[in-house]
Amino acid sequence: MAYSFDLASTYLNECLNEKKINPQTVLVDPFRYGRIHSPVGRWLEINRNNITLWRYAQFEDYVQIRVSAKDELIKDLAKAHKTFEGELNSDSAWFKREGLIQEKALNNILAKPVCPLRDIVEHKGILYHPKPNGSIADAQKYVSSLRQATDFAYYCTFGPDPKTRTAFARLMEDKVKRPTTEVIFKTYFGVGYDEFSARIYRYFTEASKQTEYQDSAWGAPGMVVYRFTSKDIPQKVTWADATRSQSARIISDWFLVNKQPAIALKTLRLADSDAPYLRNDPEFCAALGLSEMQYGDKTKALALLTQATDAKVQRPEAYRSLSRLRFENIVAAKGKDYKLTAAELSDVITPLYAAMKLSPSNPQTYLQFMEVIQHINDPLPEDFLKTLVNNCIQRFPDNFDLLDQFVPILLKSGLQAEASRLLNATAKCVLSKEEQPRLERLQAMVSGRNPAL
């Protein structure tokens, strides 16, 4: 189970990094592996009955307040003795009475959310621990902020309204480009901060009715996101030993993730020498070929990637890399200004066609198309260029590294209307202060106000 959590968190971080979203932010931190906010030491628990997300852990929050506001808390507890002592059974053991007094005092501190949602959503980075021996108010605000950030993230991604999932994802992408405001928030969620916060806690308190947390403004700490039924009982798992190819690729990938490419390549080479029959496995050929291309022998990589792609391996990077190797070999032999023959163009561009059709989409495929187009005499077919425009509009409308190369190519091919259509899609994207002038420069180029092509 621990490995699966680690794998899921690693995958999430890779997705965030691809979108240039900092994982160390208050709205993403609730999904961090090892986050201690539950009785089981994880933010997610799966058992025979349900899947539960843990929003907060009362005991850990108490400890946080004790550590952060020790001196003031001692004084506050002294007052609590006078306030609560008459309410408690005088026959209770001393230590039990003391524990109940502390619990009740701390419950008062954490009675309800205290931070405006604006402070959570517009916050940059992560929340830092308050200074030791600070005020109860600072500790209260810190703990409440952590809880509210978690509640916002979990409600958006696992709550009752599917639309909030998309809104949350778009908000996270938006935060990369510009500071968040309530106006921006409303464009994604349809309501302002106060109304959305009210919805969150209305949901959690309604779900906690007829439980011991029914009177809590927070609701129960566990958020059940799925309940299993008899239909959900999976078939018995049949275990099988990993093949030599699978184990070698898994171990190699692990070393790559841990930034040890030399050991990753050595792992695959060792498997190749120990078991030559692995060359019959297209997935192994693709893995070894990609590793050789980046960190080893490019001549070997070319043969391996050719074999893998001939077998229709479903790895777009294998096709991009094969195209890259063929193109580099031609340019190295014939010069950087050389124009490709029809046969050479087919050899280079055919793997890119294949990569373009595979998932996931990657702007690098299209950037390589742009580079190849610079080395041909005759323009590519108009229908194909229009297909590229459609794909860019759907997938990469604000990738300016791609736009800066593609727009001039469209104009030189006489496709001004297509260039305008592409930039219209870009104009609808959230753009940073640095990106806006780049768009305006391209728009001027298309309209003819900028003669430099």
Image (tube, grey):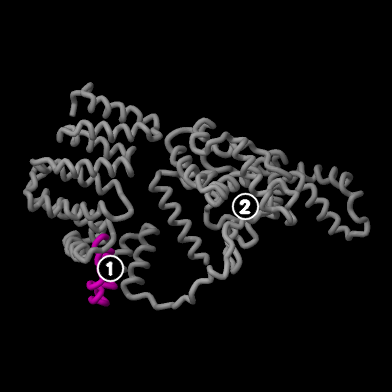
Q: Residues within 10 Å of mark 2 (few under 14, many from 20)?
A: many
Residue 261: where, in percent of width, then height?
32, 60
Q: Is residue 268 left or right of residue 345?
A: right
Segment tinted magenta in the rendering: 270-290
Residue 64 at least partly seen: no
In this picture, is 224 found above or below 382? Answer: below
Toward the viewer: 61 or 377?
377
**Residue located at (39% from left, 29% from top):** 433
Residue 364: where, in percent of width, then height?
27, 47
Q: Residues within 10 Å of mark 1 (few under 14, many from 20)?
A: many
**Residue located at (48% from left, 64% from top):** 4
Residue 30 at least partly seen: yes
**Residue located at (57% from left, 55% from top):** 35
In the rendered structure, which amino acid carries the disc numbered 2? Arg
Residue 417: where, in percent of width, then height?
22, 32
In the rendered structure, which amino acid carries the disc numbered 1? Phe
Magenta stretch encompasses residue 324: no
In this picture, is 391 found above or below 51? Answer: above
**Residue located at (35% from left, 60% from top):** 256
Q: Which residue is mark 2?
A: 55
Q: Is residue 109 left or right of residue 414?
A: right
State how far apart marks 2 and 1 are (Cα): 42 Å
Q: Is residue 106 left or right of residue 433?
A: right
Residue 416: where, in percent of width, then height?
20, 31
Asked which quadrant contains residue 283, the reply is bottom left
Q: Which residue is mark 1?
A: 284
